[in-house]
Structure formats: C-alpha cells, structure tokens
Image (tube, rainbow, N blue to C red):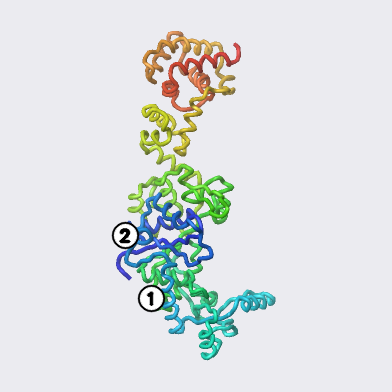
Amino acid sequence: MPNLVRVRFAPSPTGPLHIGGVRTALYNFLLARKLGGTFILRIEDTDQARFVSGAEAYILESLAWLGISPDEGIGVGGPFEPYRQSERKDMYKAYADELIQSGKAYYAFDTSEELDAMRTAFESQGSAFQYNAVTRVKLRNSLALSKDEVDQLLANNTPYVIRLKVPAKGEIRFQDIIRDWVHVHTSSIDDKVLMKSDGMPTYHLANVVDDHIMQITHVIRGEEWLPSAPLHILLYQAFGWNAPQFAHLPLLLKPEGNGKLSKRDADLGGFPVFPLEWKDPQTGAISKGFKQEGYLPEATLNFLAFLGWNPGTEQELFSLDELIAAFSLERINKAGAKFDVKKAQWFNEQYLKQHDAKELAATYLPSIETEKGEAYVHLFLDRITFPQQLGQMVQEFSEFPESYDEAVLSSKWNAETKQALELILGVLPTCTNWHAEEIKLCIQQCLDQAGIKMGKVMQLFRVAMSGKGAGPDLMISLELWGKEQVIARLSKALEKFPAI
C-alpha cells in the first residue's frame, strides 16, 4: 500500500444519486484533502440490468455543483484507466481464474431451476437455503463433480458462475475506524458469486480487485455495506492482499428518527433527497433536487458534513477549507443521523445572508433596476430561506393590501390614531427628500407637533401600508414603494378602516 491516502467514491449508475451518497463522496473528499491524498471517482456499472441512462452524467453534474472534484477517475483520467468497470470487464476473469487455480473459488453449473428446487426443499423443512460448505457438496459444481465431468461441462460451454469457496469454520475479524472491532463467523456467509454466467463480475469481485489495483487505502462507505465487509475481507485474504482500512458511515434517518430515509419520506415531507432535480427516463416523473429547490451548494455541503460528524466545538458554519481542516473519521458517530430539514433550511438562510446583494438582485430580480433590486434584497434577506423567494416577496410587496390585520385594528384603531394617520397623509406630499431617514423625520416632526407619540401609531401605519401587523423595516419599505404609492395606500386604508 502507498503511504499517501487514496480514497474512492464508487457509485452505480442505477438512478439519481441519493443525498446519502453525496455525503459519502464528501467524507472521502474531505479526508483526501485533509491528508494530502487522492480522491478517485469510479463508476461501478457491473449490474447492467439496473443501468439507467443519464445516471452517470447526473452523478458527475451533482458532484461538480457541490465542488466535490475528483483528482483521478471518471472525467479526469489517471494511471489506472479506465475507471468505468464495464470497460474493465476482461480483466476480472483473470483474477477469478487465479482463485480457481488456488482452490479459493470454484465453478458452479447449477441452473436457476435446480437452485429454485433446492430453495423449495429447504423452505418445506422450515429453513432457508444457503449455498455454502454444507450444501455445495450436493450441488452441481467443480467441488462435487469429478474433474472429467467438470472438464466436459467446460468443453461443452455449459453456462457457469464462479463462486468463492468460503471456509466452513473460521472467524473474520477486522477493525472498522468508526465501529471498532467486527467479528463474523464464516458459517453466516454463503459462497457468493464472483463471476456471472454472462462473463461480468459481481460487485464484490470487481470492487475488491479495483480497490487493490487502484491502491485504495481507506474504504469509506455507507453502513448498508457493513454486512458485505467480511466477504470482502475473505476475498483480500484469498488473493493474499492487504485489506484497506474500512469506515462504515451511519445511516441517514427520517426527520423523526425512526427508520432509514427514503424518497417516499421526502415526497411526503415535501423536501428533496437528491442533489439535483431528476427526471425518470421511463416514467417522466420528476423528483426534487436541492439545487432547484434553492439550496446553495456551500449550505448543502455544510449540512451534509454534520449528518454523522461533528467537529467537537460549538462552530456550525464552515467554509469548505474549514471543513477540510477540521475533518477526521474518528469524529464520525456510529448512531444514525436524523435528516433534519429545518436545519438544512437554517444553513441555507445563514449562507444567503453572506451572499453579495448585487449578485442576488441580478440573478433573482433581473427586471428591477440594480440599485432598487439591491435594496429589495437587503429588505427581505432576513425573511427568506431560498433565493427564489425574493421575486415572490417583491411581488407581494408591490401589491396593494386587500385586507387589514383585524387584531391590530381592534386594539390600535381609535380617535387618536385616526388623527395621526390623517396628519401623516397630509404631511407626506411635503416630504421632498424621499429617503427612509428623511421620511421618518418628516413623520416624526408632524406627530410631535400634534403631541402624539410615534410608537403609538407605527404598527397601525404598517397595517395601512401592507395589511399586516409585522414585516420588514417600515421606513425602507416606504422609500421603496415611492411617495405616490404610499399616499395611495394610506388613502385607501383610511377609507376602508372602520368608522369612528
């Protein structure tokens, strides 16, 4: 193994990349950057039956959007090309044959009908069938048949698979960085297929062979792969190779914490579990994406980093460079991580506030003059979660109110406040310098002369302007509405408010 850390993200192009997969890619990426290693992107497409058109391009686009850039692999190249397993097909057979020659694997000629019959026989006795050291002696394979029979079957091109010969008695032990020592008895592992009858390797063989060839030092992957780890250890041992270090990440749980997060949970909750929007090539169904929903890439990264990892400090907002500096596998939790959508939204709000107002205005309020657009951004930035809400806020802001807050009217509307609003209506046309501070000064002087405290009338004045008892800065709002519209709004409100 090389001294430098080499990690890989190896998704299968069977559909959209789940956000849990993005987290796996991120943790691999962070470790490589932290330790000056290499982050590799490999596509594991040995399961051609589940291949989905467009899925690989989607994976690449998703990682690019988030800035999780590979140093080697698909789209980049490197010393171990190709990085797409379907293009490495011919190579795997040699490794399977090596295991055959060393007695660590064997040919199995059983038909699907024969295996189904065996399963049925086991089920009739109340047990589950497993192709292992006990059953393999009764089946059609090179361990149970004579050499002549095997040679004849091979000569006749009889379809076969190659299975790993799992020891009947033994214990597999390995130390997972996150879960510490894992112990599994070989009797619980069946003789997995390594090469399928179509000549394609299974995931298990291709994965181990490629990780060895590509000199992977750390395998960081989801908890769902933990049951496969003992099998992979057996394969490393069968080849006489040193195994990489394993780190199995905690599951992403539903927001309420009971069970693994699924697309159905996301659909019911109205939130995305994919980085980008995905259109199913067969059904045309569209699934929400973080990007299209308005999540910023830096907020998404920060949110994902905290799903199972914590820095051990009170800091929550991290730039990518800060995440790299703080990250370690040892600070990843074993327990599943709740997918807290509200926390994702909070991260987005924090990063939105850091964005350049001019840039946001140009992108999301393109039809509004630049200076005014920036003013709108500043006005609403504390009140939005997603940048596309700016347009909606401006539209609502521009519309005249159709109704007025009844609670405020019932508590604030009286002879004194009516007089105050009428005075304000009278003084507004005289406010020559229509800027927030000057407007406020103009109104304050008017009310002071009448002996009315400004605080008594401001909430009611807001209701007259917007129909609502709360909202963004009122004086800046008046400036943005413009003198004519403010006078028109106040005139309309005084007509609509109850008679006194």
Answer yes or no: is residue 21 visible: yes
Where residue 249 appears, x then y in whole percent? 46, 60
Considering the image in quadrants, where does the C terminus appear?
Answer: top right
Residue 416 position in % (x across, y down)? 53, 11
- Which residue is label 2 attached to? 35
Q: Is residue 178 visible?
A: no
Q: Disc 2 residue type? A: Leu
Residue 172 vertical placement versus 252 (above, below): below
The local crowd at label 2, few if under 14, some if 14 to 19, many if 20 or more residues have their Cα within 10 Å, is some
* In the depicted structure, whether residue 299 falls above or below residue 475: below
Of the pair 51 and 498, the residue shown nearer to us: 51
Q: Which residue is mark 1?
A: 241
Residue 403 rendering spot, x and y as whole percentages: 58, 23
Is residue 337 or residue 13 the one in the foreground? 13
Closer to the observer: label 2 or label 1?
1
Q: Give above or below for 258 relative to 373.
A: below
> Which residue is depicted at the point 46% across and 39% down?
386
